[in-house]
Amino acid sequence: MQRRSITSSQTVGPFPHESWRWSFEAASASAPDSQLIIRGTVYDGAGQPIDDAVLEAWTPATAIAEGTRAVPAFRRVPTDARGQFRFAPTASAPRDAGEPALYLTLFARGVVKHQFTAVFLEDDANVMHSSLLQQVPQARRATLIARKTAPREYEWDIWLQTDGETVFFDYR
């Protein structure tokens, strides 16, 4: 039997927002009308917003174009003082029906190892036929689906360490 080697991991630390803040000025830029918007809040296990998390996102189209597993090259966005984030992926990015709008990696204080997740759009007619979503127990799928709040705008919150915790994936 072959043993897997274990690689080290390090917590993001208690003050990542102090060193990251300067590098995210472009994250607050407004999106052109040709884009959709996904916004939300990251919450900890006590229901408190996490004000120093970073989300790294890429579209399925980016992953396909790179010809490899998903490459986190799309955008990094920090949460603000209220734990809120905002992504504006291009609406014209091609994706197969039922595919996530975004793949995300979450970095936050107290999270020993970054977490991988995905967000789907509730008005995608093929969302329940997604091969990725079908791997998630029916009762937990809603944690991955963004609610439509306005034309081309969606709300999706990320919850940690609760009964309603957002589903995170283990990519090997």
Image (tube, grey):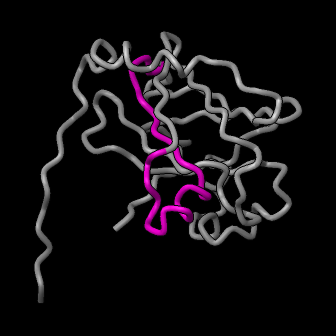
Residue 138 drawn at (x, y percent): 66, 62
Residue range highlighted in magenta: 49-73
5, 64: nearer the viewer: 64
Residue for point 77% across, 39% down: 147
The image quadrant of residue 150 is: top right
Q: Quadrant of the C terminus?
A: bottom left
Relative to 105, say whether 96 is above or below.
below
Q: Residue furthest bottom?
A: 1
Which residue lies at the image location 26% right of the left edge and 16% below the top edge?
A: 15
| Residue 131 percent location from the top left of the image | 64, 72
Give yes or no for residue 65 being in the magenta stretch.
yes
Q: Is residue 46 above or below residue 58?
A: above
Q: Would you say 152 lies left or right of 113 here?
A: right
Q: Is residue 100 magenta?
A: no
Query: In this rendering, would 1 be left or right of 44?
Result: left
For the N terminus, the quadrant is bottom left
